Structures are given as C-alpha cells and as structure tokens.
Amino acid sequence: MAKEDNLKYWEKGVSGNPKGRPKGSLNRSTIVKRWMEAGRDYKNPINGLTEHLSQEDILTLAMINKGIKGDVSAYKALMDSLYGAVKQTMELSQAEQPIFNKLDIDVITDDSTEEDSEIT
C-alpha cells in the first residue's frame, strides 16, 4: 500500500500530465521497428552460411528452426503469419426463431378513476 505522503491529489478536471508527451518523442512501436531493422552478421541456422541479416530475419529464422525441430507452437505461429489465423465459424442448424412464439399479454391502462379502483 502506498504511503499517504507519496500520493498526489489532483483537482477534478486537472490532468496529472498537463504538457503531455513531448513533441518529437517516439512511441514504442517506432522504436521496435527501428531496432528490428538493425542488421548484423549472423550464421543462418538453416543453411549454415554467415549472412548480414536484420533482427527480424534472425528471429524469423529462429522460429523456422524451432518449427523444423518439432516445436508445434512455433509452427503454428509461422503458419498464422504466412496464411493468417484460422477463423472460427459457427453454423446454425435452423433459422432464427423468436424466443416467445405467442405471447398473451393483457395490457392494463391507467384510465380508471379512484372510484373504479377500490382495494379490497
């Protein structure tokens, strides 16, 4: 539990970060994309040759290598990336039916006067 002197109380309608994120700062996906594109010399685990590969290539080759060795989850991830994830479908055996076929409702209106509605 936090100590009370560490808690900051904000007035209603006042932001805790009034200036917001600084202009020009990068979001996480931009930073990850930049590092995934960074290249280095790496021994390809599939063909054994040393090549200049991006981090994305290295990770993809690692997944392929795991799939080749029998890792079913790696194989599924690769197939989903390659062909798209399998869509789940639901087949209905009969046409849509209303929940209540016949609903017998007596509508009561408030047209009665006090004299008509005596409580017994």
Image (tube, grey):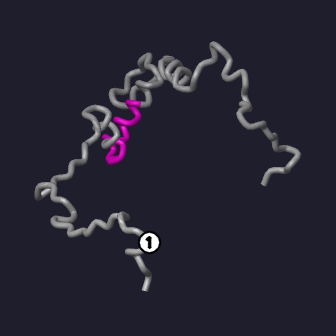
Frontmost residue, 94 versus 112: 112
The picture places residue 27, in percent across and down from the top left corner, at 57, 23
Tell whether 91 sits left or right of 60: left
In front of the other: 94 or 103? 103
Q: Residue furthest left?
A: 94
Magenta region, residue range: 60-74
Left or right of 85 on screen, residue 17: right
Q: Residue at x 66, y 22 (%)?
A: 21
Residue at disc 1, secondary structure: loop
Q: Residue furthest right?
A: 5
List the single residue furthest toward the front: 115
Q: Tell whether position 33 is magenta.
A: no
Q: Residue at label 1?
A: 114
Q: Could you say which is closer to the camera, residue 90 or residue 54?
A: 90
Q: Residue at x 63, y 13 (%)?
A: 24
Amino acid type of the residue tagged 1 in the rendering: Glu
Q: Position of residue 69 (x, y in %)?
A: 33, 44
Residue shown at 44%/16% (left/top)? 52
In the picture shown, does residue 12 fall above or below 21?
below
**The C terminus: image quadrant:** bottom left
Q: Relative to 84, say whether 20 is above or below.
A: above
Residue 63 lies in the magenta-colored region: yes
- Which quadrant of the rendered structure holds the N terminus? bottom right
The correct choice, above or below, for 13 with respect to 106 in the image is above
Q: Quadrant of residue 65?
A: top left
Count of number-bearing discs = 1
Label 1 neighbourhood size at 10 Å, few (<14), some (14-19), many (20+)? Answer: few
